[in-house]
Image (tube, grey):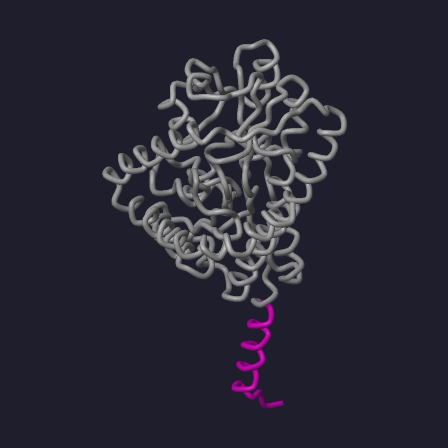
Amino acid sequence: MKLNFRILFLTLLLASSLFASQKVYKLNLATTWGPTLSPLFDAAKNMAVLAEELSNGRLQIKVDAANKHKSPLGILDMVKGGQYDLGHTASYYWKGKDIATLPFTSMPFGLTAPEQYAWFYYAGGLELMQKVYAKHKVLSFPGGSTGVQMGGWFKKEIKSLDDLKGLKMRIPGFAGEIMAKLGVQVTNIAPGELYTALDRNSIDALEWVGPSMDIKMGFHKIAPYYYTGWHEPASEMQFLVNKRTFDKLPKDLQKILITAMRLSAYDMYVQNYDMNATAWQEMKKEYPNIQVKTFSKEIMDAMKKANQELRDEMSKKSPELKEVLDHQDAYMKKIREWSKMSDYLYLKDNI
């Protein structure tokens, strides 16, 4: 029998192509969160499940919680260095490494979650984020929002700026710098020690997240004043992806990964919204003495002034940060008018 080498070659080429299309890509993801911290850890788990389902098993992602890799605040370095292919964390943790990463989580008095998602996906925010992270050799994508975070639990009512002076409070990051300018003694305490510190008066107040996560910590049992938010109106988590890993994936799996991240991020926002509502109903039923408070205009004005001063100082040191903040400010001026016309006035007239 005479072999037709052309047909044989085409057959082998087709078989090779089919085999390659079924290749399984196994990736590892590290999170900042422990395995029981819902909904933060849920977002990473759900993304991995969705990516595997959408790819028909060709993309498999193993998720390691912080108790496994032991470096909750080392995610950027681990993904950049290739120890992990992906990470799930928050951009403002890298403020000390790169100040321009700060606004991609949330800024005091900034965009709300729906506004920020619109900025990311339809107004150039995502492109700015990739530009900032390019130097770190990683890609960054929105990873789920907690929405407006509460202003904190206080053991005494805060009526004036004088009440803040000397107050011992756990409030980390940029918000802590603002509070420090107002005379607060800012401290950072490990999460596992917060309840004891508040109970024993080592601190007078603390900021955590919102009812969905605060209820597990039990702060409402010992601090009756629950202040509304100002410092993190749209705390967006992030997915980090090693650029070399991403470039090695077939185009269809790149698209599937991006889609899985986007869907799981929005789902976390919705999940947390429901969890907040459910937890708040439970809190106020069991502890009716809880008083929801809003900081006075005097305090809010002082916070806004301190916030602007700090932003100006940081922007002078980082043109890249200034570019991101200016971009966000311009978009907020545009979208806030619609937010007021729609959500604000609707709620104002129906509550």
Residue 220 falls inside the magenta stretch: no
Where residue 190 appears, as percent x and y from the top left, is 53, 21
Q: Is residue 135 left or right of residue 116?
A: left
Q: Quadrant of the N terminus?
A: bottom right
Location of residue 10 by image quarter: bottom right
Q: Residue furthest front?
A: 349
Location of residue 146 by image quarter: top right
Residue visible at 32% across and 37% down in the picture: 311
In this orientation, which residue lies closer to the viewer: 225 or 270?
225
Q: Is residue 94 above or below residue 126?
A: above
Q: Is residue 302 left or right of residue 231?
A: left
Residue visible at 51% across and 21% down in the picture: 158
Residue visible at 27% across and 40% down in the picture: 315
Where residue 162 appears, as percent x and y from the top left, is 42, 17
Q: Is residue 4 above or below residue 177?
A: below
Q: Quadrant of the C terminus?
A: top right
Residue 13 falls inside the magenta stretch: yes
Q: Give the main secondary structure, helix, strand or loop, of the magenta stretch.
A: helix
In this orientation, which residue lies closer to the viewer: 7 or 267?
267
Residue visible at 39% across and 58% down in the picture: 124
Q: Is residue 349 left or right of residue 109?
A: right
The region drawn magenta spans 1-19
Where residue 136 appears, as percent x and y from the top left, is 36, 45
Q: Is residue 110 above or below residue 187?
A: below
